[in-house]
Amino acid sequence: MPFDSIKHTEKSLTNGGMVLILNTGAVINPEAEAMLQALHSRSTGGIKEHLQTLEKKGADKFMASFYVGYGHKSIGDCGSITIFIEGVSMLAAKAIQDWPLYSGQESSTRYVDFSKQKFIDPIKTTESNKLLETWRTFYLDGLTPVQEYLKSQFPIQPDQKESTYLKAIAARAFDIMRGYLPAGASTNLAWHTNLRQAADKLMLLRHHPLKEVQELAETIEQALIAAHPSSFEAKRYDETENYNQFWMKKYNYFDQSESYGDQVALLRNDIDTKSLENYREVLEKRPPKTELPKFLAECGTLQFGFMLDFGSFRDIQRHRAVKQRMPLVTTKHGFNQFYINSLPESLRPAAKNLLDSQAEEIKNLNTTPEIAQYYTAMGYNLPNKVTGDLPSLVYLVELRATRFVHPTLRDKAAAMAEIIKKEFGPLGLKLHLDNEPGIFDIKRGEHDIVKK
């Protein structure tokens, strides 16, 4: 089937973005796939018999009756869909991804042309627009001098390929300058999920504190009803809606006034060491690039607290196996010094002046803390709280304490690793960490997805 003959379901957002429910052109669509698996679980007739039933009767009435009508929610786990979302803020993207079962991809700031990329401006005044454009100007004007500065710090070596070297330099420059981009910068993302999880997540998103996210949730739901009408309906239960509205408004954002300071704090250790001692050989024999078995989660959890900029929170949030609170993006905890100290000395005074003036302009907007996030740069430090079992945290620190990870996150991952080694090394736990995490490695320039 030619691609141009496939009709996808599209809905527009008021800010100029859009939502698209992908139609793969499959003869057996997500609803039919879910129906087949449900029939297969309730009859010994075999899949070929169920395929005949599908051909004769279709999946519409089955899904409307058993999945939606009778509430057999597990049936919705059996049909997967992909939702493409374009032109929404970094804040909205994080709201979608704040879900333990999220699967998908988001545009990397490294590969976005921010000379053209839209910034979401919910206030829409001359002052608010000027604030956003001031961030853009500093970001764009700083990229070239930062790249030249990096070349002087890390000159190309005789055995290095120039194109790869230049990509690595550019990636490092983007990682530095991204701290000056506002959280309201727009992005694109894909959300691959199943019918059930989409409905469960949208039930919360429609009560999100940000109107942008509320509208996005309603638009996604409208698109899903249009694409898969037998699996989605706009049915509401008042008590459930009121409860979700209550806690989403009050507890969605992690906004504590005190800072964790410069160090990583072990806030809580609930791991039962006596239980863990029973698995000493499991801890001792694990080779590199191999995960601990999931059953070790039964031994308990650890909780860490540390300061981290929103730019790097976007990276650590990818670890769905640990629990993390969504931080409120604010200026009150100060700007991460990495983004200042990594600039050429000639740019640092301008950066400090920019941060002072922009912080004052954000105050002058006289808006809510939630809306102020759109105008706040991603380099500001925020309290971050991470809770997880040993397998999930070991995976996190080994992956993030490497030379290829952004330095502000890499340092926190390395600090968590030291605490984990101190606590559980005596029980046989070995961590396989990068031996030279601070070096500049041009292999960074190979970490790209390009059109051939």
Image (tube, rainbow, N blue to C red):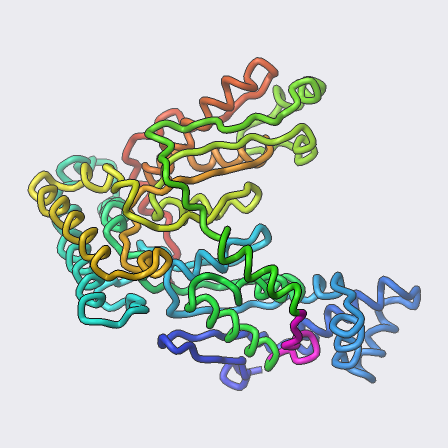
- The foreground one among 296 and 234 is 234
* Residue nearest the observer in this picture, 71 or 166: 71
The answer to which image quadrant residue 283 occupies is top right
> Which is the main secondary structure of the residues drawn in magenta?
loop
Rendered location of residue 80, percent (x, y): 64, 65
Left or right? Give the position of 60 relative to 167: right
Image check: 209 left or right of 450?
right
33 horizontally vs 132: left or right? right
Q: Position of residue 122 (x, y in %)?
A: 32, 69
> Where does the image place residue 1, in percent across and percent down from the top left?
58, 82
Residue at 33%, 43% in the rendered image: 309
Q: Is residue 231 magenta?
A: yes
Q: Is residue 223 visible?
A: yes
Q: Depth check: 370 or 433 in front?
A: 370
Query: Which residues fall within the magenta stretch?
Result: 227-237
Q: Which residue is depicted at the point 53% across and 80% down? A: 8
Q: Quadrant of residue 302?
A: top right
Of all residues, the one furthest to the right in this rendering is: 44
